Image (cartoon, rainbow, N blue to C red):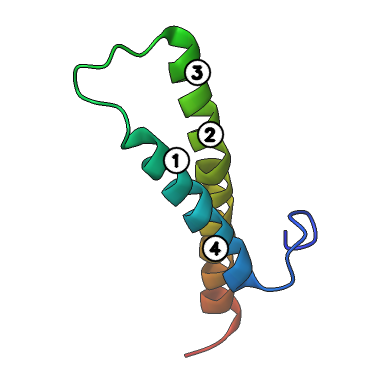
């Protein structure tokens, strides 16, 4: 997974998710509650959110798999 995302450390990969989400939040702060958002703008926002959320999902899945493997292979 690290090679796929061109990262050398797991923490850098998690930090990349944080930075992507933070950037999207900063951009969305400029929208007022009364601002009409077109379908195209909503599509762009969803695209920007889907990448880091998809990566976060993959990271969480990898961690859960690792923890499951550790619990089943290492006796307590």
Q: Find the distance from the CA under tag 1 to the CA under tag 3.
A: 13 Å
User: Residue at the spot x=58%, y=48% of the render?
Assistant: 55
Residue placed most toward the observer, 58 or 72: 58
Mark positioned earlier in the residue sequence (2 or 4): 4
Which residue is denoted by mark 3 in the rendering? 43
Q: Comparing marks 3 and 4, which lies closer to the viewer?
A: 3
Which residue is denoted by mark 4 in the rendering? 14
SS assignment at label 2: helix
The label shown at residue 48 is 2
SS assignment at label 1: helix
Q: Are marks 1 and 2 in contact (CB under 8 Å)?
A: yes
Q: Find the distance from the CA under tag 3 to the CA under tag 2.
A: 9 Å
User: Residue at the spot x=47%, y=46% of the render?
Assistant: 23
Q: Are marks 3 and 4 in contact (CB under 8 Å)?
A: no
User: Residue at the spot x=53%, y=88% of the render?
Assistant: 75
Residue placed most toward the observer, 32 or 50: 32
User: Residue at the spot x=47%, y=90% of the render?
Assistant: 76
Residue 43 against residue 63 in the figure, above or below: above
Residue at the far bottom: name it: 76
Residue 46 pos. (x, y %) = 48, 26
Instruction: Decide: few, some or many residues near mark 1? Use Cα within 10 Å; few <14, some 14-19, many ≥20.
Output: some
Q: Find the distance from the CA under tag 1 to the CA under tag 2.
A: 7 Å
Q: Comparing marks 1 and 3, which lies closer to the viewer?
A: 1
SS assignment at label 4: helix
Mark positioned earlier in the residue sequence (1 or 3): 1
Residue 52 pos. (x, y %) = 54, 45
Residue placed most toward the observer, 71 or 9: 9
Mark positioned earlier in the residue sequence (1 or 4): 4
Mark positioned earlier in the residue sequence (3 or 2): 3
Q: Are marks 1 and 3 in contact (CB under 8 Å)?
A: no
Residue placed most toward the observer, 10 or 58: 10
């Amino acid at each position: 997974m690290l090679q796929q995302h061109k990262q050398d450390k797991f923490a850098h990969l998690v930090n990349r998710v944080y930075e992507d989400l933070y950037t999207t939040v900063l951009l969305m702060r400029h929208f007022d509650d009364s601002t009409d958002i077109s379908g195209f703008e909503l599509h762009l926002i969803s695209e920007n959110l889907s990448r880091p959320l998809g990566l976060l999902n993959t990271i969480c899945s990898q961690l859960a798999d690792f923890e499951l493997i550790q619990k089943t292979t290492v006796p307590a």
